[in-house]
Amino acid sequence: MASSSTPASAPPADAAAMPKLGLSVKQIVALREEFKAIDIDGDGQVTAEELWKYLDGEVAFEDVQAIIMAQDKDGNGKVSLDEFLANEGATTLE
Ligand SMILES: [Ca+2]
Ligand SMILES: [Ca+2]
């Protein structure tokens, strides 16, 4: 009885499915949903007012403005989905 089962080092199949972003696909999907929830008028840009309303006034409006400013990479005073995701650890969304 020759049991010739040689355990070969199987390549990690999951590694190929990993996105190159710092976020998992699940996280990105969840963040996109969150972004859509914050973006009340649905123009793809979150303003300080929208975020403030989303937070239900729990945070001072000035603090919300500071959050927006910190995330606003192109300086248009609003946070796009790309900027939002970039802030959450992703590098680019293409
Ligand atoms: Ca908006
Ligand atoms: Ca911006």
Image (cartoon, rainbow, N blue to C red):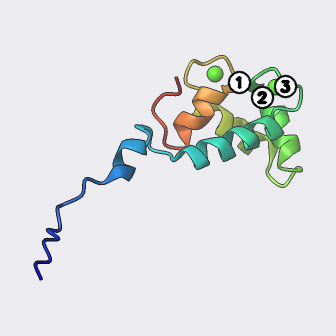
Query: Does the Cβ of the disc 1 residue fall within 8 Å of ligand 2?
Result: yes
> What kind of residue is marked 3?
Gly
> What kind of residue is marked 1?
Lys
- Look at the numbered disc 3 and give the secondary structure of its residue: loop
Sequence-wise, the earlier of marks 2 and 1 is 2
**What mark, if any, has residue 47 been given in the picture?**
2
Q: CA distance from mark 2 to mark 3?
A: 11 Å
Q: Residues within 10 Å of mark 2 (few under 14, many from 20)?
A: many
In depth, the one of 41 and 60 nearer the eye is 41
The residue most toward the front is 1
Residue 93 horizontal/vertical position (percent)? 53, 27
Camera-near label (2 vs 3) is 3
Image quarter for ligand 1:
top right
Q: Residues within 10 Å of mark 3 (few under 14, many from 20)?
A: few
Who's the residue at 45% across and 32% down the image? 91
- Look at the numbered disc 1 and give the secondary structure of its residue: loop
**What mark, if any, has residue 42 been given in the picture?**
3
Q: On the picture, is 75 further left or further right than 20?
A: right
Q: Contact (CB < 8 A) between labels 2 and 1?
A: yes
Query: Does the Cβ of the disc 2 residue fall within 8 Å of ligand 1?
Result: yes
Residue 14 horizontal/vertical position (percent)? 39, 51
Q: Which residue is mark 1?
A: 78
In depth, the one of 13 and 44 nearer the eye is 13
Query: Does the Cβ of the disc 3 residue fall within 8 Å of ligand 1?
Result: yes
Q: On the picture, is 67 further left or further right than 24?
A: right
Sequence-wise, the earlier of marks 3 and 1 is 3
Please identify the quarter of the rendering in which residue 64 is found. top right
Q: CA distance from mark 3 to mark 1?
A: 13 Å
